[in-house]
Image (tube, rainbow, N blue to C red):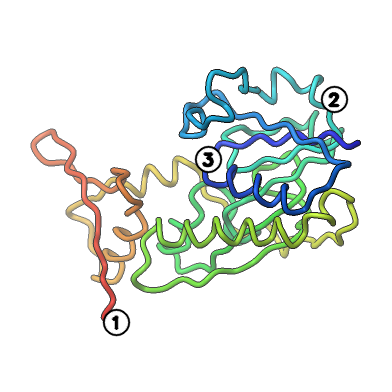
Amino acid sequence: MKNILVIIDNRVQYDRMQKIILQKNRNDLNFEFKHSSIKTAIWDHEDFLNKDSIINVNDHKEEIIKNYDLVISVHCYQFFPKRIVDNIRSINIHPGYNPINRGWYPQVFAIVNNLEIGATIHEMDEKLDNGPIICRMLVEKYPWDTSLDIYNRVLEAEMQLFYTYFDQIFDNTYEKIVPEGRGNFYSKKDFYKLCEINLNENATYGQVINRLRALTHGEYQNAFFQEDGKKIFLNLTLTPDE
């Protein structure tokens, strides 16, 4: 029996993973799901509600190494320490196409910088969203997409990869792909810098539209400008002619 620890902070992907695990019906795999201490929608899921499901990879690294055969990170808000990734096979399901889209909010920067976007499953090393690639998939990106449109497409791609490579991942029979260079890495700081709109900045209509749609993600208030000491938030609605 292989003990698998899945640290997941995305409720949608949790439900999708559960369906895939049931479909695969591998009796030799024992899954345990945990989440980070940052409050997300997954806390209110019936499988986690009122349960002690928080794990900190730094505080519990020795316990993780001792008790599990494999760790999987799914939209996890924690950075895995070198001690873990060097001593237990650790896999990340990443909402970007490595090495093009490493770091935070890959779909945002894919729009702003006109980059390809997709999903990647890879082994982790001591660097964020880095390491040998197990599988990856590009998704379509259209001129009328917002951040949320692309993000939802990427989430679906992640689970397509997880389903297709399920046995290879857990049997450790996949062939590793070496990343083609360091690619692009974007931090949270890069994202926050992008959110504030300078009303005196010179830009083309295309650049403005791309920036606003990149920062439009459902009900999230991302893009803003300041006027009279107040933040004025804005989103962009795009409707293609059918």
- What residue appears at the point 86 percent right and 42 percent down from the top-left corner? 27
Query: As shown in the figure, which amino acid type bears the numbered disc 3?
Result: Arg
Question: Which element is circle 3 on?
Answer: helix
Q: Which residue is mark 3?
A: 11
Foreground disc of the pair 3, 2: 3
Q: Reading the chain from its start, which is encountered first: label 3 or label 2? A: 3
x and y, in percent, of residue 162 in the image: 70, 55
Query: Which residue is label 2 attached to?
Result: 67
Amino acid identity at mark 1:
Glu
Q: Answer few, some or many: residues within 10 Å of disc 3's Cα (few below 14, many 20 plus, some between 14 and 19).
A: some
Q: Position of residue 40 (x, y in %)?
A: 47, 32
Q: Secondary structure at mark 2?
A: helix
Residue type indicated by callout 2 = Asn
Whole-number angstrom distance, CA of label 1 to CA of label 3: 32 Å
Q: Residue at x 67, y 40 (%)?
A: 73
Q: Is residue 63 above or below residue 162?
A: above
| Label of residue 242 in the image | 1
Residue 104 in picture, x, y percent from top left: 52, 46
Q: Is residue 75 left or right of residue 171?
A: left
